[in-house]
Amino acid sequence: MPDDEYMLFCCNDVEHPCEFRVQAKTKEETMEHAKAHMAMEHGMEEIPKETERKMEESIKPVKVKE
Ligand SMILES: [Zn+2]
């Protein structure tokens, strides 16, 4: 079995002291979850461009062993 690769987002990497983490198969999907979290937990209905850029930069690939 080859290792699976996921795109991981840790909210704490952006600007909030926050334990939220999400991983998904694609960066786009991870961003969707991350944005939903920002809206719900941090009151960001509209994500500022600068924050969105930081979020995208903080997403990193992780290997998950099956
Ligand atoms: Zn958060």
Image (cartoon, grey):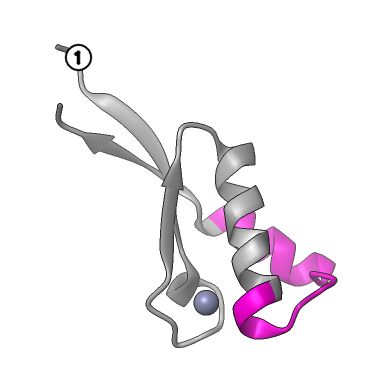
Residue 55 found in image quarter: bottom right
Considering every residue shown, the one lying at the far front of the view is: 40
Q: Which residue shows up at 19% across the image and 14% down it?
A: 2
Vertical placement of residue 2 versus 36, above or below:
above
The kind of secondary structure element at disc 1 is: loop
Residue 30 included in the magenta stretch of the image: no
Considering every residue shown, the one lying at the far bottom of the view is: 17
Residue range of the region highlighted in magenta in the rendering:
40-57
| Place of residue 58 in the rendered image (x, y in percent of width and height, measured from the top left) | 51, 58
Q: Is mark 1 within 8 Å of ligand 1?
A: no
Residue 54 included in the magenta stretch of the image: yes
| Place of residue 7 in the rendered image (x, y in percent of width and height, measured from the top left) | 44, 41
Q: Which residue shows up at 62% across the image and 50% down it?
A: 31
The type of residue carrying mark 1 is: Pro
Our reading of the magenta stretch's main secondary structure is helix
Residue 3 found in image quarter: top left
Quarter containing the N terminus: top left
Quarter containing the C terminus: top left
Relative horizontal placement of residue 59, taking residue 49 as reference (left or right): left
Relative horizontal placement of residue 21, taking residue 40 as reference (left or right): left
Residue at which label 1 appears: 2
Q: Is residue 34 visible?
A: yes
- The local crowd at label 1, few if under 14, some if 14 to 19, many if 20 or more residues have their Cα within 10 Å, is few
